[in-house]
Image (cartoon, rainbow, N blue to C red):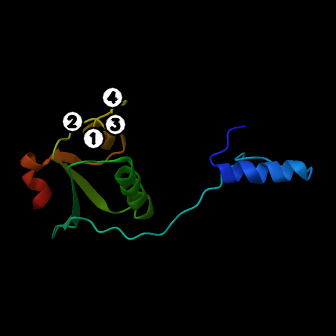
Amino acid sequence: MGFRSKTEEDVAALLSNLNINYEYESKKIAYVIQHNYHPDFLLPNGVYLEVKGYFDSADRRKILAVRNYNPGIDIRMVFQAPHNKISKRSKTTYAKWCEKHGIPWCAYYDIPIEWLL
């Protein structure tokens, strides 16, 4: 069995030596950690603009969590390079990820004027 650390391996050995049955990482337990989100820009029309150069997995999770927790919020992504891939092994770009999740996006040099009014 592959343990994540030597300490876990030592505890498993102790349990085994004491003939105590156990399961190792056999369950998934959901949890939520409360955070506060500070959007980059709030416009007078109630639109939030989140500006990203690099859009990593933590940022993607955060944006989805903010939208799920605040269903009426209007967040729009403004990317430096919207056609960058979300990872080296993925074909999905920042833009495609937004489209998949119903999040409006644009390039920073091409922000639609109607977003701003």
Question: To which residue does mark 3 refer?
Answer: 87
- In the rendering, which numbered label is found on residue 94? 1
Query: Residues at badges 4 and 3 in contact (C-beta under 8 Å)?
Result: no
Amino acid type at circle 4 is Lys
Left or right of residue 104, residue 101 in this image: right
Label 4 neighbourhood size at 10 Å, few (<14), some (14-19), many (20+)? few
- In the rendering, which numbered label is found on residue 91? 4
Label 3 neighbourhood size at 10 Å, few (<14), some (14-19), many (20+)? few
Amino acid type at circle 3 is Ser
Query: Residues at badges 2 and 1 in contact (C-beta under 8 Å)?
Result: yes
State the residue at coordinates (92%, 49%).
19
Question: To which residue does mark 2 refer?
Answer: 83
Tell me how far mark 4 sits from mark 2, CA to CA.
Answer: 10 Å
Tell me how far mark 1 sits from mark 3, CA to CA.
Answer: 10 Å
Give percent across and percent down for residue 55. 29, 48
Give percent across and percent down for residue 6. 66, 49
Tell me how far mark 4 sits from mark 1, CA to CA.
Answer: 10 Å
| Front residue of 72 and 29 | 29
Q: Determine whether 78 is above or below 66 in the image.
A: above
Q: Determine whether 97 is above or below 71 in the image.
A: above
Give percent across and percent down for residue 109. 7, 47
State the residue at coordinates (22%, 63%).
47
Disc on the earlier residue, 1 or 3: 3
| Front residue of 3 and 87 | 3
Amino acid type at circle 1 is Tyr
| Front residue of 9 and 92 | 9
As helix, strand or loop, the secondary structure at mark 2 comes to loop
| Residue 21 visible here | no
Query: Residues at badges 4 and 1 in contact (C-beta under 8 Å)?
Result: no
